[in-house]
Amino acid sequence: MYRKSSIGWAKHFDFMLLDLICLQAAYISAYYIWHAGNSPLNSPLYRNMILVFFFCQMSISLFNDSFKNILKRGYFQEFSATFRHVLLTVLLSTLYLFMTQTAGMYSRTVMIITAEIYFFATYIVRCLWKDFLRRKGASENGTRSLVVLTTEEMAADVIQGLKKNDFSGLRLIGIALMEEGSKAKIGSRIDGIPVVADAGTIVDYACREWVDEVLFSLPREVSLSEKIYDELVEMGVTVHLRILRAMQMEVNGK
């Protein structure tokens, strides 16, 4: 299963590498289109631009945190983040050309086509790669992982209800307790299932551990957090809602 590294930029090295490949492919394609099938590798001037794009793209990625929280982004958020990243990369590259007084030697059309291809290519690749990581995480375990968001009082009954129903394809990997002060209970176990998060850490946990599905099972007096719900949905996590009475009926066999 995919795990994010804890070492700064190395967390998303795979995304950075794919982004770099998209940029170089976009530049070569743009030159090929505008110069009737020729390659920038045949021109010392345009060959130098390959290195310029490389350093500009890496600088924006590192200093602008372009890939921060990339695994949490929905499609619209990714679209906006990609547009900003591409714009900054092209602007920095253009600034370099002006600073070195070589801007007039390059075709503005090639730069524009490069930016357009780069934007669409890297956006599609980012989305596909995130989908691939999700599928890979699920296939390695043979099931879809499930986390239950509930209260400490309800947790045991919820676990019993899930075990009794034996939901096909779902593997309960943890419990998230939604009461205030539940953070201290993270790491403990309820009926053999670990407490993995509380209300303040469940979204980060779902991103880090590639949770496939989340079940909200809360008593009526505990309100459903719309913020948590929306963030999980934006991440592509399947969210289920269930009330206390339904769970009690399943456990008691009524």
Image: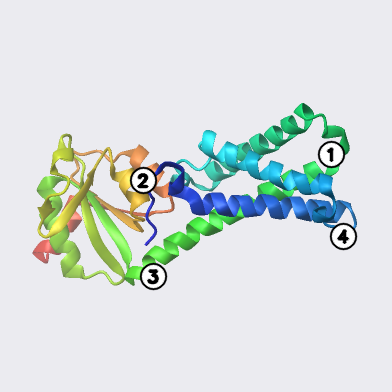
Residue shown at the point (37%, 62%) measured from the top left: 1
Q: Would you say 170 lies left or right of 218 here?
A: right
Which residue is label 3 attached to? 139
* Residue density around tag 4, few if under 14, some if 14–19, many if 20 or more, within 10 Å: few
Query: What label sits on residue 6 in the rendered view?
Result: 2
Q: Secondary structure at mark 1?
A: helix
Tell me: residue 164, above or below residue 146: below
Q: State the CA–CA distance, disc 3 to disc 2.
A: 24 Å
Q: Which one is in front, 99 or 246?
A: 99
Q: State the CA–CA distance, disc 1 to disc 3.
A: 46 Å
Mark 3: which amino acid? Ser
Residue 22 pos. (x, y %): 65, 53
Mark 1: which amino acid? Arg
Which residue is label 4 attached to? 37
Tell me: residue 137, above or below residue 111: below
Tell me: residue 172, above or below residue 224: below
Give the color scheme: rainbow, by chain, secondary structure or one colour. Answer: rainbow
Q: Would you say 100 lies left or right of 176 here?
A: right
Kindly tell me whether residue 71 is visible in this rendering.
Answer: no
Q: How many marks?
A: 4
Mark 4: which amino acid? Gly
Marks 4, 3: nearer the viewer: 4
Quadrant assignment, res 100: top right
Residue shown at the point (83%, 48%) measured from the top left: 44
Task: Answer with mark 1 or mark 3, whichever residue precedes in sequence.
Answer: 1
Q: Which one is in front, 222 or 2?
A: 2
Q: State the CA–CA distance, disc 4 to disc 3.
A: 42 Å
Which residue is label 1 attached to? 108
Mark 2: which amino acid? Ser
